[in-house]
Amino acid sequence: MLVKLEPRGQHSRKMAYLSPVLAGVLTLITSGIFFFLQGLDPIHALKTMLYTPISDTYGLAEWCVKAAPILLCAIGLAVVFKAQVWNIGAEGQLLIGGLLASSVAVNVIEAEGIWVLPAILLAGVIGGALWALLAAWLKTHFNANEILTTIMLNYIALNLLVFSVHGPLKDPNGFNFPESAMFGDASLMPVLIEDTRVHAGILFALFAVAAIWVLLSRSFMGFQIKVLGLDHSAARLAGFKSKRLVWVTMLISGGLAGLAGAGEVTGPLGQLVPQISPGYGYAAIIVAFLGRLHPVGILLASLLMALIYMGGEMAQIELNMPVAITGLFQGLLLFYLLACDVLINFRVTLPWLSSQKTTAEQVN
């Protein structure tokens, strides 16, 4: 064996929080090298991606629009990940939330009243929660691996959405485009800043951050979730019902992802289209770990991820880069985060070098 990882005796709490910062710096350095090899000025390219998109008021507003669904999905994932329940299905739960919310919205286009928008958002929450609970049921009743089931449910959700916009929810007056009819005014999120797309979804996201912080740090349920995540055996000995906690955490995670989907269709889009998410649910997994599963850290990481999405779009326009540039940044960030975490928790040793030294000492 050329390289061996040995557990460190004591973990550095300080380095655990500095790890995301170090991962970000390494991502910037590697990205600069990549742009240089592409024949671009690295400083100009990074400025185009990370500063230009938010250099004016409209850009800052779009930043909030992008951050809201990522933040909702990520803060929900923090709950399940704290319990060591690996929900990889926030993307599918977001899509189902958007689908069910749209199903209600297209049937109340002419309706008026303050009940319309809450009913649509509630449908989105219920849709995302039920999709997550399907995976929870498979885990608790059949011991099915939730990583596999939630990933597979993502593709089922996507195909259900595509079927819907090509079939029952397709706008009959939409010139055969795969999209629903535009929602009525009562079905749309209130705009917070005039002449921008910033809507009330960002307030829901911020409220969710505060609520999850209270849940995890100030409630007995949060304590049970943490104990379950640290040691399942200890949770059982303490009398905590692990299956119930799995259902509760998946319910919260799926509901918040469903709310993110409902916020997208009632907010910036105003209708159901196949591309309601460019991968927010998958990006939220990176955000949750980048933010160290802490609500404040997740808030900051969500802003960074939203900026990467905006920067990727700007790089396509200004630098003639492919659409994959966004995925490249996300992949580098995740790779360096995992690498830093490994080096924090483990020490790299070279067994072959140690054996050579031992042999030399024995000869002498």
Image (tube, helix red, strand yellow):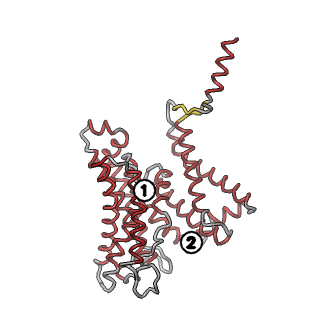
Is 218 displayed left or right of 88 in the figure? left
Location of residue 283 with respect to 236 vertically, above or below? below
Q: Position of residue 131 (x, y in %)?
A: 34, 61
Q: Which residue is mark 1?
A: 151
In the image, farthest residue toward the right = 39
* Residue in view at x 38 percent, y 46 percent: 84
Residue 151 vs residue 312, the one in the foreground: 151
Location of residue 217 with respect to 75 vertically, above or below? above
Is 316 displayed left or right of 66 in the figure? right
Q: Position of residue 188 (x, y in %)?
A: 38, 78
Answer yes or no: do the residues labelled 2 and 1 have beta carbons within 8 Å?
A: no
In front: mark 2 or mark 1? 1
Sort mark 2 into few (<14), some (14-19) or many (20+) by Cα contacts within 10 Å.
some
Q: Can residue 352 be seen in the rendering of this structure? A: yes
In what element is the residue under mark 2?
helix
Q: Quadrant of the C terminus?
A: top right
> Quadrant of residue 262 in the image?
bottom left
- What type is the residue that disc 1 sits on? Ile
Q: Position of residue 330 (x, y in %)?
A: 56, 57
* Residue in view at x 37 percent, y 43 percent: 229
* Distance of label 2 from label 1 (alpha carbons): 33 Å
- What type is the residue that disc 2 sits on? Gly
Is 3 displayed left or right of 229 in the figure? right
Location of residue 292 with respect to 190 vertically, above or below? above
Q: Which residue is mark 2?
A: 59
Q: Position of residue 239 (x, y in %)?
A: 24, 39
In the image, farthest residue toward the top = 364
Q: Quadrant of the N terminus?
A: top right
Q: Can residue 248 be seen in the rendering of this structure? A: no
In what element is the residue under mark 1?
helix
